[in-house]
Image (cartoon, rainbow, N blue to C red):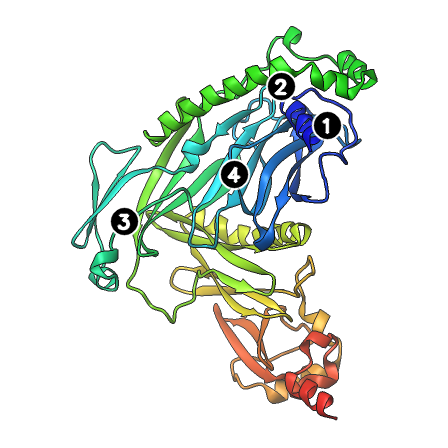
Amino acid sequence: MKNRNMIKAALCLGLGLSIVFAPVASAKEVLLAKTKLQHKGEAVKAEIWGNKIAGGYAKDLMIILKREDKSVITGYKPDIAGGYGFNLKAVQVEKKDGDTEQLLLGIRQGDWKTYSEYRILDFRNPKDVKEIFAGPDSFGIVTSAKLEDNVLKVTTVRDLKPINVELNKKLIEDIAENRRKVEFGGLTSLTCIDINKDGITEIITNQQIRADKKTLVDVGAVWHYIGKVEKQKPEEDVQKDSEIEETKEESLMDMLKSLGKELEKLEQEKQQEENEKNAAKKEGQTKEKLWRQDNLTIMKADAPNRKNTINDGAYFNGGMVFPVKMIAPNGEATYPQIMLNNNEEVQEAINKLLWEEAEKYIRLYLRGKADLAYNVIRKDSKLLTIQLISGKDTFVHHNINIIPGEKKKTELKDILDVKSKDLVELLNVLNNNSKITWDSKLTNEWYTREDNLYLMKNVNGIDEVSGYDMNNLKRYIKHKNFLPDKEDKKAKKS
């Protein structure tokens, strides 16, 4: 254990050692997330490792940057105790020096009703990794909030005086008087996207102010990086390739012992930085003004409707769907992401899929053309179905069906023999919507509820739906997950 910690400490110094990675990843340590990253024109891998304990919580975190040959470039220990649902993503917050990307780290601190921790790391100088989006930034832009009757007084880093927001009276009445203490933690959502497609990544954040775990308002903003990415230190301060090669020949233990003084100095410097960050956190921003926030929007919540599940988080077999929200003066967009308890590889693939499916609707939202929402239609051991809903006055519905454990979207052709002419004829005979006629090109917009299959078709700008009892389609069913439960029960009895 002591030796492993020393290796971790050495990695924090960015010595570029080419060492076997096995000692870092013991039986308790697992890979939590990974992504590809451009580093000085070279394609490298960023990984985050940690000790995972019961319930999916991981702690003792370490980010490793390494080359394709698995040699370590540097390591970095984030100032986050731990969390769930780890996410790494390459971003480009500054167009200059486009051959080097920055790394976004996202760590959930609980379910969809809690805040998350976010960092953006600059690895330009492996010996001096910088947090250019740090803890104080992740804390959000709200500096104070006070509830007086049904008026919420909100102050942000952009305002000298509070902004008065008159809330829905029914929303306040639904909260007991002794539970109306206003709370706001860190950011609840963060989206990195190149809004203008100019090569620069903007950050869209959302922060919720709550009372008794009920959302009172959402506070949104767009962040633009205005600081300068830390320049490379002079050559004499950075190890050259030849020096790195020499370290390979040294005894690893001898080298680690010689790092004592340097480690002590590093810890002192990190403690000083931490003190400065904590002081800056009280002001709601980092010490250096690295970011400019605009499009500040405060959107008040509607009166509670417990039957409305639109944009709700949801637990499913082995994981959770959670909302990522963006708001602007002209509307809002909320798209889904997932967190799996014990399958980071599938989680990464599905979240990439969900983003790709939602991105075109998000871009419509950014242009003010449509809002975006989602609804979890099915979430059992056989199928996860999430429906995206995009529009203003009329709405387009896009269904994403995923069989648990798989990394791809499930198409209609995966569950039905869509090439069968008999199937098309049967669908028309059983069709219960006179506005729909099926031909050889069947739709790929579908979802299921219990033993019913619903096929969707856009007719004159309106999404129309026709439902079918899957007992009537059993001859054409290709996937065991979609065999009607009634038939399963009969089979078991016999």
* Residue name at image x 42 percent, y 65 percent: 394
Looking at the image, which is closer to me, 253 or 102? 253
Quarter assignment of residue 380: bottom right
Quarter of the picture holding the N terminus:
top right
Q: First in sequence, mark 1 or 2: give its number.
A: 1
Q: Secondary structure at mark 4?
A: loop
Q: Secondary structure at mark 2?
A: loop
Farthest residue to the left: give it: 149
Q: First in sequence, mark 4 or 3: give its number.
A: 4
User: Which residue matches tag 2?
Assistant: 127
- Which residue type carries mark 4? Ala
Q: Is residue 367 above or below residue 199?
A: below
Q: Is residue 464 above or below residue 337?
A: below
* Residue name at image x 67 percent, y 72 percent: 441
User: Which residue matches tag 4?
Assistant: 81
Tell me if I can see residue 289 in this picture.
Answer: no
User: Which residue matches tag 1?
Assistant: 72
Q: First in sequence, mark 2 or 3: give its number.
A: 2
Q: Measure the C-alpha gap from mark 2 to mark 4.
A: 22 Å
Tell me if I can see residue 13 in this picture.
Answer: yes
173 to the left or right of 260: left
Q: Measure the C-alpha gap from mark 4 to mark 1.
A: 23 Å
Farthest residue to the right: give it: 249
156 to the left or right of 243: left
Q: Measure the C-alpha gap from mark 1 to mark 3.
A: 46 Å
Please state the horizontal and vertical placement of residue 433, each as a whole percent of the image: 52, 83
Q: Measure the C-alpha gap from mark 2 to mark 3.
A: 42 Å
237 to the left or right of 218: right
- Which residue type carries mark 3? Val
- Which residue type carries mark 2? Lys
